[in-house]
């Protein structure tokens, strides 16, 4: 039969199917030190950090948006917040490096767990591969959560529950402690592609899907850093929690105006993730930002000429929405307010 | 081999390969595992069907969950100490759960607050224990476990009256100041008063060697905290208690672990969980207070868009018996609003 046409076809099909079937037991090895392609992907978000009210592209609900609009960066200066860690579904977008290794049964060599040590914030994850159940709903939550993994062909699929409250975009949009993240790890040569799908019944209307690539480092060196210690940063009343009262955040429009965007875009929501939104965006007015406290013309001027199709000249922000500032903006004269600093400002309590 | 036979052979080989492929792919796609929502205790519980769960917390301290409010169990060579007792209807299951943790004698029960969900089984459980001495109990009482609460808690129970709260549920051992110290199972146990928290008689219990705090109802993982206005509760008292908790809790590494907390209800937490809860309540309090300073009435504050609790409602507005609106109203009134 081998010498016949049908025999060759059969052999070919068998070969294809056997190869296709092989990954089910092959179990890809992710062992090694991996670094983020910081300059190639998502650089601004990974390093400098997002601007205030930069919610675009996130499938958030209105409550998450309100959380972000009330957020005052001075909150991170509170002692207990200073060493707060990026949660499991966010940390891979940090200035990230990781060492990954396997834990195997010394006798059977079956895979018990995959360990991931992450240098930023000195985090250690364990992805259990031995089929153990997830903890009780009454068990504590951690920054990295509780993870179990299974192989789906060449792909490692990880389910993580029991994650602490954190954020989907740092210092902006919260993630709740009821989020669940499904990760898919794929290796192609020296590239590790990390895909995460996070569901959050509290703050997301749709799953948040992200993909990030890492490259295998030829050097085995790996230096965990972030020996975080609390320090006093300025004086504040005991129990004080900086926040903006609803409608009183003065920096709402800064990011939008700086990038010639309509305000609606930067407020996020599932529709801002899809291509169809571009048509709607073109019909919206570009945001205008006025530096808080400024009496002269705005420090961050609106675009000289709005792109065609955006409704022409810049229009004022929505009623009740104060002009806004944000990261990177110069402090106003007199230093009464800091757009991003950790120091408390008089406005924080909205008195 | 004729053509049909050859194709049948090919088909058989394909089936065999597929079978082999499936057989070797032993692992199944991931189940739909999701983080459980923190849900309040059922409004109309079917007591017979409810189950309790025991979980180790840290050191000598364990959690019994599901009997109403959370119950903290400290167990060691000298005996067992309980913080709160749950509903009376769950007392048999609570007792069985306690016995799973330790077969030592129940020595002490401490109440953190007034609610039935925390004090309901006081009488039943106390009778199961003995203080660590021969003969009758203190003051000629039966020799049973000591029951401790703040003097304000006893005062509240007295005010409410024995028709509604049986005398056997009242704490005979009271402390009147800021704190009371115990030493049991080679561990300092500090009871700290929370003035005007959920009620006027609230306490938190700090196990200093195990590094665990039982916070009582000032920290509830499934709802906004109850404010029992009629019995001295206040938003600022609750915040005072939470801020005190943050002072005594020490995280182990990067704001995680270290001192663990058993909330009045819901899952075990650490300092960061208390922190986020404190932040939330402070922000809501500040909104209500700022609105009051503008002269807004309660009706106007309740009608605010967004509401003072808006972004926290998907997570904490889950208890029909204690809604976000009720919480805002109680906060307003405890801040002096009429």
Image: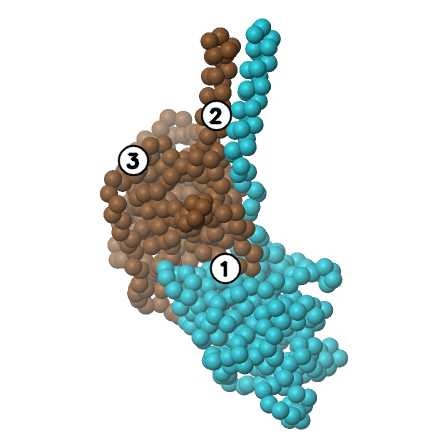
Chain colours: A brown, B cyan
Q: Which mark is residue A140?
A: 1
Q: Chain of mark 2?
A: A
Crowdedness near tag 3: few (<14), some (14–19) or many (≥20) residues, C-alpha within 10 Å: few
Crowdedness near tag 1: few (<14), some (14–19) or many (≥20) residues, C-alpha within 10 Å: many
Q: Is residue B36 above or below residue B330?
A: above
Foreground disc of the pair 3, 2: 2
Q: Is residue A229 left or right of residue B112?
A: left
Q: Nearer the viewer, residue A162 or A299?
A: A162
Crowdedness near tag 2: few (<14), some (14–19) or many (≥20) residues, C-alpha within 10 Å: some
| C-alpha distance separating marks 3 and 2 | 37 Å
Q: Which residue is mark 2?
A: A18
Q: Earlier in the sequence, mark 3 or mark 2?
A: 2
Q: Chain of mark 3?
A: A
Q: Chain of mark 1?
A: A
Which residue: 55% across, 19% down? B13
Q: Secondary structure at mark 3?
A: loop
Q: Marks 3 and 2: CB-CB under 8 Å?
A: no
Q: Nearer the viewer, residue B285 or A105?
A: A105
Which residue: 60% across, 90% down? B133
Q: Is residue A290 left or right of residue B240?
A: left
Q: Which residue is mark 3?
A: A40
| C-alpha distance separating marks 1 and 2 | 44 Å
């Amino acid at each position: 039969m081998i010498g016949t046409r049908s025999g060759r076809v059969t052999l070919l099909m068998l070969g294809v199917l056997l190869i296709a079937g092989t990954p089910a037991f092959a179990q890809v090895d992710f062992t090694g030190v991996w670094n983020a392609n910081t300059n190639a992907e998502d650089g601004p978000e990974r390093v400098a950090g997002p601007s205030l009210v930069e919610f675009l592209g996130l499938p958030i609900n209105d409550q998450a948006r309100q959380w972000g609009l009330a957020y005052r960066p001075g909150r991170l200066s509170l002692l207990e917040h200073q060493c707060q860690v990026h949660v499991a579904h966010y940390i891979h977008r940090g200035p990230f490096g990781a060492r990954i290794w396997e834990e195997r049964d010394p006798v059977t060599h079956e895979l018990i767990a995959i360990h991931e040590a992450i240098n930023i914030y000195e985090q250690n994850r364990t992805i259990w591969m031995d089929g153990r159940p997830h903890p009780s709903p009454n068990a504590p939550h951690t920054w990295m959560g509780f993870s179990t993994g299974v192989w789906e062909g060449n792909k490692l699929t990880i389910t993580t529950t029991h994650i602490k409250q954190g954020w989907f975009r740092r210092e902006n949009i919260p993630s709740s402690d009821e989020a669940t993240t499904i990760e898919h790890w794929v290796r192609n040569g020296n590239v590790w592609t990390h895909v995460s799908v996070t569901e959050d019944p509290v703050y997301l209307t749709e799953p948040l899907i992200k993909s990030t690539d890492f490259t295998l480092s030829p050097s085995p060196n790996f230096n965990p850093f972030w020996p975080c210690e609390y320090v006093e940063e300025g004086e504040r009343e005991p129990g004080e929690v900086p926040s903006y009262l609803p409608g009183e955040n003065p920096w709402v429009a800064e990011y939008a105006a700086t990038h010639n965007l309509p305000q609606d875009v930067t407020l996020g929501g599932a529709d801002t993730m899809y291509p169809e939104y571009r048509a709607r965006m073109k019909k919206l007015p570009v945001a205008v930002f006025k530096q808080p406290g400024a009496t002269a013309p705005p420090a961050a001027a609106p675009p000289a000429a709005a792109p065609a199709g955006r409704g022409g000249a810049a229009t004022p922000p929505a009623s009740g929405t104060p002009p806004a500032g944000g990261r990177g903006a110069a402090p106003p004269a007199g230093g009464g307010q800091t757009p991003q600093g950790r120091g408390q400002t008089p406005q924080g309590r909205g008195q | 081999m004729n053509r049909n036979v050859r194709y049948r052979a090919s088909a058989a080989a394909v089936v065999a390969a597929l079978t082999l492929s499936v057989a070797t792919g032993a692992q199944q796609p991931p189940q739909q595992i999701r983080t459980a929502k923190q849900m309040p205790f059922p409004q109309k519980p079917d007591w017979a069907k409810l189950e309790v769960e025991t979980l180790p917390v840290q050191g000598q301290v364990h959690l019994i969950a599901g009997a109403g409010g959370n119950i903290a169990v400290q167990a060691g060579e000298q005996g067992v100490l309980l913080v709160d007792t749950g509903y009376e209807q769950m007392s048999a299951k609570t007792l069985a759960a306690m016995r799973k943790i330790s077969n030592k004698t129940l020595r002490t029960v401490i109440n953190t607050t007034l609610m039935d969900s925390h004090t309901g089984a006081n009488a039943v459980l106390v009778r199961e224990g003995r203080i660590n001495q021969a003969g009758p109990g203190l003051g000629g009482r039966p020799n049973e476990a000591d029951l401790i609460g703040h003097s304000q808690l006893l005062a509240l129970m007295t005010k409410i009256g024995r028709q509604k709260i049986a005398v056997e549920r009242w704490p005979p051992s009271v402390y009147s100041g800021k704190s009371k110290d115990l030493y049991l199972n080679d561990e300092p146990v500090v009871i700290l008063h929370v003035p005007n928290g959920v009620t006027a008689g609230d306490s938190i219990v700090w196990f200093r060697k195990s590094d665990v705090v039982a916070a009582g109802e000032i920290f509830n993982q499934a709802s906004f905290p109850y404010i029992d206005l009629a019995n001295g509760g206040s938003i600022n008292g609750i915040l005072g208690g939470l801020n005190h908790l943050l002072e005594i809790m020490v995280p182990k590494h990067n704001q995680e672990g270290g001192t663990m907390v058993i909330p009045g209800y819901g899952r075990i937490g650490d300092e960061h969980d208390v922190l986020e809860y404190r932040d939330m309540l402070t922000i809501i309090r500040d909104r209500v207070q700022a609105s009051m300073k503008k002269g807004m009435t309660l009706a106007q504050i309740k009608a605010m868009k967004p509401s003072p609790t808006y972004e926290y409602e998907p997570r904490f507005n889950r208890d029909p018996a204690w809604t976000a609106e009720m919480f805002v109203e109680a906060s307003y009134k405890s801040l002096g609003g009429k």
